[in-house]
Image (cartoon, rainbow, N blue to C red):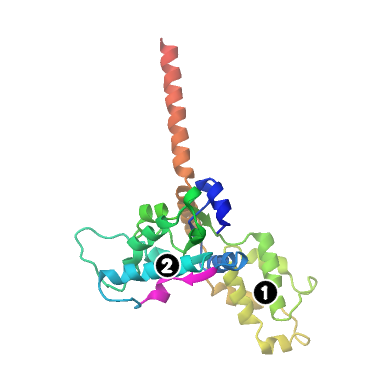
Amino acid sequence: LAQTDIRQKAPENLTARSLLLYGPKGSGKSMLARAIATETGSTFFDMSPLVIEGKSTQGGAKGAALLVYKVFICAQDMAPSVIYIDQVEQVYQASKKGKKSGDPNAPVRIKKDLSAAIKQVKRGPEATEQDRILFIGAMSKPFDENIDSKELLSAFDEKVWVSYPEYGSRVVLWQKFMEVHGVFVDPTKLNISTLARVSDGYSAGSIKQTVDRVLTARRVQQLKVRPLKVQEFIGPLSRTAFCWREEYQQFSDFDFEATGEKALHERRAAEEKAAEEAQAKGKGK
């Protein structure tokens, strides 16, 4: 999304055409995508499966291609542009061999055309004003076994893990979400630190949902008579989405592979092993 002269001079590995965001539900992936568009003054196009469901310019296989093509042409004309695809895992579903294509309106219908559109964005000296386009994909289950991981990872240049907040951020989030309702917390009356500790593993969206459920208009009016207690938030919090340790480990494993760290680790291990074998042979002589 940088200026054209910068994109022409910058190395290609620093001018991303696409960005993949993955993390638990409510971690702020959609908000981050919209923030990128807002801060860069970009036009925001939403091509999420929920948005394009049942929509097509014409029937048949050409309908999906034309849908992606027309969005891409509009994005070029209105550049800089951000093309956002939420739940991108539904688009990059693996096709089973020998099985006929199912629902013609399924999100997977745009997979091939979407990957092709991303590759059409030029970088380096050939870049023009119309190439100021960034594709952003978001997903909450990148480790799903039905995903075509190879195609997905090759389509997106940059990968970012949007995890749940750490303790310090949770303290701030509890305070800020309460302030939205006009409630300014007195640390001597409500222990925010305790709320931050018990909400470990919960996303920012879960914390916001909890505060919205507890701080109703009626409850806010009763604060002078009945001050807030930590116990009031525990029940509503437990009914929101939680990232279990097993799920966190799956995110960690996917991030290890997606960012290229796994391949780098394996290459270094192979080099060290080869060096050790060469050294052992030298001593044997």
Q: Quadrant of residue 173?
A: bottom right
Residue 177: which numbered mark, if any?
1
Question: Are there few (<14), some (14-19), or many (20+) residues within 10 Å of tag 1?
Answer: many
Magenta segment includes 38: no
Q: What amino acid is labelled 1 in the image? A: Phe
Is 52 left, or right, of 259 in this rendering?
left
Above or below, comparing residue 155 to residue 196 in the picture? above
Residue occupying image coordinates x 50% and y 56%: 128
Is 110 left, or right, of 220 in this rendering?
left
Q: Is residue 202 visible?
A: no
The region drawn magenta spans: 43-53
Q: Nearer the viewer, residue 24 or 57?
A: 57
Point out the image quarter for the C terminus: top left
Residue occupying image coordinates x 48% and y 68%: 77
Residue 109 coordinates in the image, percent (x, y): 31, 67
> Which mark is nearer the camera, 1 or 2?
2
Q: Quadrant of residue 53?
A: bottom left
Q: What amino acid is labelled 2 in the image? A: Ile
Could you say whether the residue bearing mark 1 is in a helix, strand or loop? Answer: helix
Magenta segment includes 46: yes
Above or below, comparing residue 170 to residue 270 in the picture? below
**Would you name the residue on which mark 2 appears?**
73
